[in-house]
Image (spheres, helix red, strand yellow):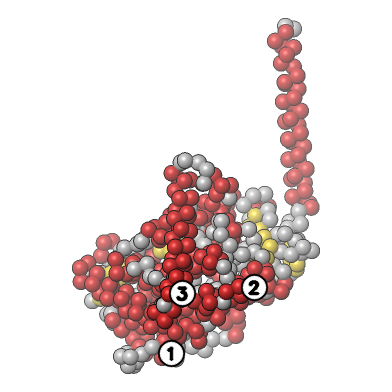
Amino acid sequence: MDRAEIRLLPSKEVLILLTCSLLVYLGFFLLYQIYFDPLGRLPGAWLARWTDVVLKYHWLNGTRAQYVHRLHQRFGPVVRLGPNEVDISEITAVKEIHNIKTGYKKSSFYEKFIPNTVNVFNATDVDFHRRHRRLLSAPLSESSLKTVEWAVDAKVKLAIKSMAREMEQRQATDVWKFWRFLATDVISELSFGESFGMLEAGKKNQYIVDLEGIAARGPIFTTFPGLISLASRLPIPIFSAPAAAAKRMIRYAEQAVLQYKTHIAVNPAAAKPMLFSKLFAAGENGLTDDEIRCEAQAYIVAGSDTTATSLTYLVWAVCRDTKVKETLLSELMSLGEDFGDSDLRQLPYLNAVIDETLRIHIAAPSALPRVVPAGGSTLAGYFIPGNTIVTTQSWTLHRDPLVFPGPELFDPTRWLNATKEMTDTAMPFGGGSRVCIGKHLARMELRLGTARFFRAFPSAAVSTLESMSDEDMSPLAFFLLAPKGGRCLIEAK
């Protein structure tokens, strides 16, 4: 045996030892997963015991909500999604999960979703959330919103004029585009004291371009959170662009908040109504400028595409059903010319159409992850250990055939005599104490937008121009819903 062979012997032995160690480790891991896994009794796809790779694939592909729903149809109300993640659709368990008193905190998913900022939406600290929600709730109450109704309605009327102009030029209008402009202009004016002016300009401003760029990478960053830190360090466009966009958004928000604060100090009577006006005047009892900036940015994210998605799918669904449209038009045409939101609140069929849209075309359809408190909990008949990620999704809750017969059918009449079980199960704005703080504003926009659209375009119909088809409206379900084709063409015949 020569010297080379002698030198190779130790390395071969090390390789064999490492291989054997790996096999032993895998053997113990398999035995543990089969016989001692605390989630081993839970129903679900067999691969979920070992990995959540399938779940991540669907999350990145915009089909997570549909995939999890199929699992529920196959396995029941409790479904294991990965080694440490479970989804539950049993309403009693869902209510426990979303009750702040039961100790289920938001998971770190929310911090990854909007990195480097803390606000009422993504805060995992209960005391932080409680304090901010208490201060922010009053301006968004139904009574307080009456003072800004004129501003919302003015934007709605401008959106309708823009749609009419495009119909003349194009023979159809992209309601998805204009509803997004509307919702974003409304929430930017109420958050920053100044509208982004996209309806007037007919195009997105830099803030929204930056926001969309970050949102497009959101699923990637939440799946691979390590990329967030790389994004600010590597001079590669795919990484550096989101970091630069985030800095521009923060700078814009800081400038807007400072500008509004200056206007209040110089001429408080001339300042436009804003959701944070009272907080500026509250001094030490309110929020700091930086806290207001963070909340304003969260409002833009939460209050733009959500409302736009709901309005888009509402118009599309109504235009596809002659009977629904005729019934809605009959109710809307009974209004006088000077109607307001208080009149619309009294229209049963209009509000039933809105409720049905929020049920079947929910803007936030996917997981709302929480962490099971230490000690574990029994949910829907299964013990779930502490620190397990437990999620709920409205996509499935809203399609429970026992609560909503014919769940895939768009049927507003089901809400005219809604049962308690229906209202308990419907969670279009989330649930519990973390329910969306802007739900009353969203409903105001939905009522005004729907009423003014169909009164202006009573003959509205889904267009087939430019190869528009139902495939364009197939839902992409990331955290928020969006039409696959990125458009919704409507024509007035």
Disc 3 crowd rating (10 Å Cα; few below 14, some 14-19, many 20+) is: few
In the picture of the structure, the residue carrying the numbered disc 2 is 130
Q: Secondary structure at mark 1?
A: helix
* Residue type pointed to by label 3: Ala
> In screen coordinates, is 392 left or right of 8?
left
* Residue type pointed to by label 1: Ser
* First in sequence: mark 2 vs mark 1: 2
| Label drawn at residue 342 | 1
Q: Residue at x 69, y 67 (%)?
A: 104
Image quarter in which the C terminus is found: bottom left
Image quarter in which the N terminus is found: top right
Q: Residue at x 47, y 83 (%)?
A: 145
Residue 112 rendering spot, x and y as whole percentages:
57, 56
* First in sequence: mark 3 vs mark 1: 3
Q: Mark 2 near mark 3, Cβ–Cβ under 8 Å? A: no
> In screen coordinates, is 406 left or right of 122?
left
